[in-house]
Image: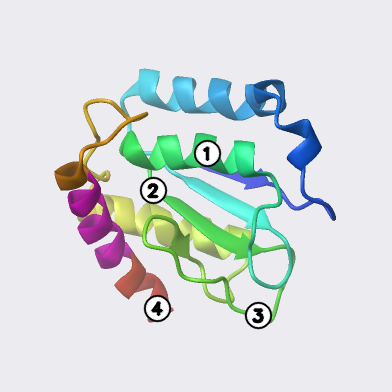
């Protein structure tokens, strides 16, 4: 399980170079190589858990399409609620550490998300399966 801290104070639109994603790309590759239950907790901006970098968010969306769930939370003890998304799990008002524990429990209960054959271009049917699996995770996160 990885906690990714990603919450600058500005969008990285002028830094859309994929080089800013090297750490995430390597982390994703390592998690897929080990073939274990794994996922990501993204500690984004406070209080809503938003990521400011669209290129880094694309890497995490690829992780989701590869079968690794990703939870968004705000930094610290945000006292806010992470915005829902059909692919990213909203961590509500949980801290990153609590979201990590709950994600581990969900992985043990549900297993990994269904991976797309081509994570860069999932089919509509694959996206539907991923959304259904994320919704099951989200139900658990909504109650904690």
Is 49 a magenta residue?
no
Secondary structure mostly taken by the magenta-highlighted segment of the chain = helix
For marks 4 and 3, the one nearer the N-term is: 3
Mark 3 → mark 1, Cα distance in angstroms: 24 Å
Is residue 37 in sight in this rendering? no
Q: Residues within 10 Å of mark 1 (few under 14, many from 20)?
A: few
Left/right of residue 95 with respect to residue 9 in the rendered view? left
Q: Position of residue 1 (x, y in %)?
A: 49, 41
Q: Measuring 27% from the left and 36% from the top, which residue is drawn there?
A: 122
The answer to whether residue 29 is above or below residue 50 is above
Q: Position of residue 123 (x, y in %)?
A: 21, 38
How many numbered marks have been drawn onto this rendered protein structure?
A: 4
Q: Nearer the viewer, mark 3 or mark 1?
A: 1
Residue designated by label 2: 69
Mark 1 → mark 4, Cα distance in angstroms: 25 Å
For marks 1 and 4, the one nearer the N-term is: 1
Label 1: element kind: helix
Residue designated by label 3: 80
Q: Measuring 20% from the left and 45% from the top, which residue is drawn there?
A: 124
The answer to whether residue 66 is above or below residue 10 is above
Q: Nearer the viewer, mark 1 or mark 4?
A: 1
Write down the region rendered in magenta.
127-137
Residue 65, picture quadrant: top left
Indicate which disc residue 58 carries: 1
Q: Position of residue 112 (x, y in %)?
A: 27, 43
Q: Measuring 64% from the left and 60% from the top, which residue is drawn there?
A: 50
């Amino acid at each position: 399980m990885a906690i990714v801290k990603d919450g600058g104070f500005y969008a990285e639109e002028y830094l859309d170079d994929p080089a800013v994603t090297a750490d995430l790309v390597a982390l994703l590759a390592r998690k897929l190589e080990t073939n274990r239950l794994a996922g990501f907790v993204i500690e984004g901006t406070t209080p809503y858990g938003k990521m400011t970098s669209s290129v880094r968010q694309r890497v995490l969306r690829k992780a989701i399409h590869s079968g690794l769930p990703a939870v968004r939370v705000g930094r610290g003890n945000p006292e806010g609620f992470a915005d829902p998304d059909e692919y990213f799990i909203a961590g509500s008002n949980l801290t990153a550490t609590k979201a990590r524990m709950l994600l581990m429990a969900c992985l043990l209960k549900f297993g990994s998300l269904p991976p797309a054959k081509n994570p860069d271009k999932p089919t509509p049917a694959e996206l539907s399966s991923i959304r259904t699996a994320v919704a099951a995770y989200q139900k658990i996160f909504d109650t904690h």
